Amino acid sequence: MDITTVWEKLAWESGGKIIYLIVDGGAGLPDPEKGGTELQIARTPNLDELATRSSCGLLELVGPGITPGSGPGHLALFGYDPLKYNVGRGVLSALGIDFELQENDVAARVNFATLDDSGKVSDRRAGRIETDLNRRLCDKIQDKVKLDFEGEFFFQTVSEHRAVFVLRGAGISGNLNDTDPQTTGKAPRDPEPKSEDAQKTAELVRSLVEQVKQILADEHPANGILMRGFEQYKPLPSLKERFNLTGLCVADYPMYRGVSRLIGMDVVPKPGGMKERFQALEANYGEDYNFYFLHVKHSDSEGEDGNFEGKVKVIEEVDSLLPRVTALNPDVLVVSADHSTPSLMSAHSWHPVPVLIAGKYARIDEVERFDEYACLRGSIGLRPATHLMGLSLANAKRLRKYGA
Amino acid sequence: MDITTVWEKLAWESGGKIIYLIVDGGAGLPDPEKGGTELQIARTPNLDELATRSSCGLLELVGPGITPGSGPGHLALFGYDPLKYNVGRGVLSALGIDFELQENDVAARVNFATLDDSGKVSDRRAGRIETDLNRRLCDKIQDKVKLDFEGEFFFQTVSEHRAVFVLRGAGISGNLNDTDPQTTGKAPRDPEPKSEDAQKTAELVRSLVEQVKQILADEHPANGILMRGFEQYKPLPSLKERFNLTGLCVADYPMYRGVSRLIGMDVVPKPGGMKERFQALEANYGEDYNFYFLHVKHSDSEGEDGNFEGKVKVIEEVDSLLPRVTALNPDVLVVSADHSTPSLMSAHSWHPVPVLIAGKYARIDEVERFDEYACLRGSIGLRPATHLMGLSLANAKRLRKYGA
């Protein structure tokens, strides 16, 4: 029994407002040289004060031992079990650049990459080329590639080395392997079809990859592409349909705007840097929405770069801006993360993330610090992240009683 | 959704080595006269030191309130949900004596027992007869019993009072009740069929039991048999197929070698006593395997005998040998138990067992003792035991990221 479907039946239209402040990859591992995790080392007087008047705990995003991508991580926090609502990076990336995906479009995430003379990947991100160069290359590809297909395709810039490929037409499928080998020193992989009905799509993708290689032959460092997360777009049931929530997303990165749009949230256009995002939340807080998602990206980026101090700084910046959120006095304020990104590992990880729920009806516990260890002793316990939406709805008095 | 099937999709071939050190029945209940549990009273400096640099927690083996047999307990630790992968004791015992079970064979565990004049059980283990006597009795039974059946049967010694019965042929089923009443003072029970297709097998077993009673009429103390765990053999998907693990089992008791073989592990032949088993692990540790299962049996036997001090001694012996395992420097070292066997109860019990996971990426917590209480405050929390395999794979970096 998927417990989230019970909330669907119990959620009514009345109740309070909920804010989710999600610090991407905010959790980590203790670094012996630093004497703690990033959250433990960061000076966070505001978060800690908030923790003292919250219910605290830990969330496991997708399942034990499973390292979540950011898409699945966020879906879990929003009450969509990622094992049930399986959405690929391609679809999320397309939605994130405001691309109007139509049902059954096949989307894939693209990296511009550097290939060496033997065709092997020497840089999976082509030195993180400028977005302007990316735009020029996408235009070139869109212009010159010809696919033997009655439908159409779109090749569009996201940012830096990131682009999106969308295929639209009859008889296509997203059931293909990535061409991205996820490592350097290897050639891009074949987009092998994983089922019979993906044969044709695989051929189209092979042809695309081959033509792009010719078209970019003289470009440097972006002389090839890597594709991953092929997926056929099927819209998900919205937050409104499921939980009677009208949501607003304040996020700067395409992925997060994408996942929000996928579940029917409105999205603040290009809110900008961290401070601007907190301001955008303030500016949009009101009667039009009852669910607000404020996203902080750079905690994850610094973690992925193995920059412990950098991640600590991002967390401290979040802390300094937190009073702007608490000043809005939402009925329920949630702070959590979509996965751990320990600087020690320079990668996402499976370790559970701390969570706090502040609100009039939270069962306040003894936790006085917002970190991976203090929250272990909180009243929420260690739970699947999908539980968070139910607890948030309940704390906002948005769920009817079950039975009489 | 069975989360273990998600790891199947995410497990790749690369990653580190995992050692499971399983202290059978190692957990218990506090004895008021002793001032703690067996694990609390035992002097375990090495285990405790290991706990200080591990993630700790508690595992529930089969489910809340469910007392596991050793088979289900181990299957859970290996990531096989025992409610889904239901294997009877008979099949495990047969595998454990290197009996080459064929698909659809029906196996049962047999105890030689003492029956009184009225046919009631007076000793369920026939005074733990010598293995040599067991062999003579098995030969006699194999020789003299005639079953009205076109297939064949096998009646083979395990050790002491333990034997195995295997039925091979068409139209048989393992869906029978045990004849073992699990207590003295009662007559053996009828092997009642639990489904229509087990009628014929039930008749064959009734006939076997009756003939054995005649054949052993003059034997003492082993003048009867008790049978349990009837099961039709269906091989399980292997650790290699499921999780890309090549496993080696170092265990002395047939049951544990059996469960290991059932999931495709290689088994060290007759490793011998506890010290010899630790040596066998050392001798076999290398490039051929990436998953090692080292089993300690006597903690359970002492617990079942109600011998608190004896169990404490076994735990202390494990502790003294632990440095030989840590010296191998595996990427992931797990210490846990397949169930509790509180000396106070002289039996297996449902109480969760402590677990520790040591490794470079473990989220080290504040726990400084390996016991049932200290581990409650660990970062793993209290979880189903099936989660352990996912956490172990993750810590060994043997799982891909989920989604993008």
Image (cartoon, coloured by chain):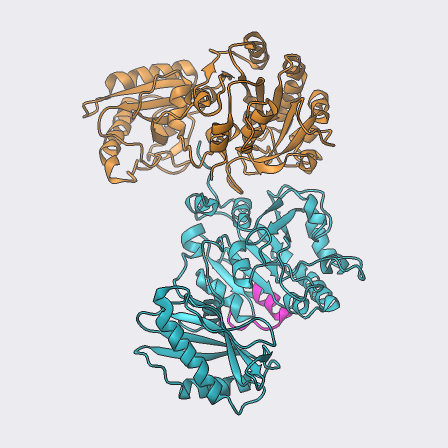
Chain colours: A orange, B cyan
Q: Nearer the viewer, residue B291 or A223?
A: B291
Residue A373 visible at all: yes
- At a point 38% along the width and 21% down the height, the residue shown is A94
- At a point 33% along the width and 18% down the height, the residue shown is A138
Which of the image's four quarters has the C terminus of chain A? top right
Residue B108 placement, left or right of B312: left
Rendered location of residue A245, percent (x, y): 50, 20
Q: How many dots with numbers?
A: 0
Rendered location of residue B74, percent (x, y): 54, 59
Q: Quadrant of residue A340?
A: top right
Q: Quadrant of residue B336?
A: bottom right
Residue B198 placement, left or right of A23: left
Q: Nearer the viewer, residue A82 or B113?
A: B113
- At a point 70% along the width and 53% down the height, the residue shown is B370
Q: Residue furthest bottom?
A: B218
Rendered location of residue A74, percent (x, y): 50, 28
Tell me the magenta residue range.
B267-281
Instruction: Indicate whether B358 appears above or below A348.
Output: below
Q: Quadrant of residue A208?
A: top left
Q: Residue furthest top?
A: A283
Residue A112 visible at all: no
